[in-house]
Structure formats: C-alpha cells, structure tokens
C-alpha cells in the first residue's frame, strides 16, 4: 500500500496477481540456494532483488475478493495468488463473467454489504 493511505478493509474484484517480470520466473527455484534466502529481512531482500519495486506486500487487512466464475480474462489460479498475499481473505465466487459488477450488481453488492457488516 502507498504510504500515507489509511485503510481498514480491502475489496478486490476480478483481480489478478502475477509476476510483473515473467522472464525472471525461471530463477525462482534457485532462490533457496542463494545466500540471502530465508526468512525475515533476508527473504525481503531476495524478493526485492527479483521483483524490485513491484513487490506486493502481504495484505493484513480484512479482504474480500469477488471472483467471476465465468471469467475468460482472469484465470482461476489468480485467486490462489491473492490467497498467498492475503491468507485470511474471503474469496467469493459469483456466477458471472469478467464484468461481474455490471452483470450481477445485486449479488456483488449483497456480498460486499455482508462482508462489511461482519466487520462492524
């Protein structure tokens, strides 16, 4: 998250997460063998060296991720990547295409209201 922005919740819709530098993906299996791989600051350093300024920090806020069941643009695997960044995220599938907010606005709004109500 950008500095100076304060949030208490995150709502994602038809979101993808992926490597912004896919040509470097081949080195990922080598990270455990690098001298700076591990946990804590050494893990952050290794992620920075691979991803640079595109590192997505773990999301520690209550998160709702609306997933379109019939999305032809965003693969289902994207939800697993979101789950890695936000392990406590609530993923909700909606029977809709990619533009789920337009096609199933009522159902999406109901899920958002339910998510916000659970947090209050």
Image (cartoon, rainbow, N blue to C red):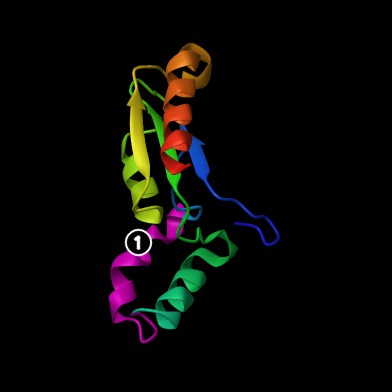
Residue 40 in view, yes or no: yes
| Relative horizontal placement of residue 60, taking residue 35 as reference (left or right) | right
Residue at point 35%, 61% (across, down): 26
What span is colored magenta in the figure? 22-38
Of the 4 image quadrants, the one containing the N terminus is bottom right
Please give the residue where the numbered disc 1 appears in the rendered image. 26
Q: Secondary structure at mark 1?
A: helix
Up-down: is 48 above or below 103? below
Residue at point 39%, 23% (across, down): 72
- The location of residue 6, given as percent across then percent down, is 64, 55
Can residue 60 be found in the magenta stretch?
no
Residue at point 35%, 31% (across, down): 92
Q: Nearer the viewer, residue 38 or 22?
A: 38
Up-down: is 56 above or below 29? above
Residue at point 40%, 79% (across, down): 40
Q: Quadrant of residue 118?
A: top left
Can residue 33 be found in the magenta stretch?
yes
Q: Nearer the viewer, residue 112 or 2?
A: 112
What's the magenta bit mostly, secondary-structure-wise? helix
Q: How many marks?
A: 1
Residue 98 in view, yes or no: no
| Relative horizontal placement of residue 69, taking residue 73 as reference (left or right) | left
Up-down: is 80 above or below 39? above
Residue found at the far right of this picture: 4
- The location of residue 69, given as percent across then percent down, is 33, 23
Pointer 1 local density, CA inside 10 Å: few below 14, some 14–19, many at least 20 = few
């Amino acid at each position: 998250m950008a500095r100076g922005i304060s949030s208490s919740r995150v709502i994602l819709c038809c979101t993808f997460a992926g490597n912004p530098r896919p040509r470097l993906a081949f080195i990922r299996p080598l990270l455990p063998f690098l001298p700076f791989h591990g946990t804590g600051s050494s893990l952050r350093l290794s992620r920075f060296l691979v991803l640079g300024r595109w590192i997505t920090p773990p999301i520690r806020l209550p998160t709702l991720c609306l997933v379109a069941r019939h999305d032809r643009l965003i693969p289902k695997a994207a939800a697993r990547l979101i789950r890695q960044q936000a392990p406590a995220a609530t993923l909700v599938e909606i029977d809709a295409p990619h533009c789920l907010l337009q096609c199933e606005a009522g159902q999406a709004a109901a899920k958002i209201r339910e998510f916000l109500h659970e947090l209050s």
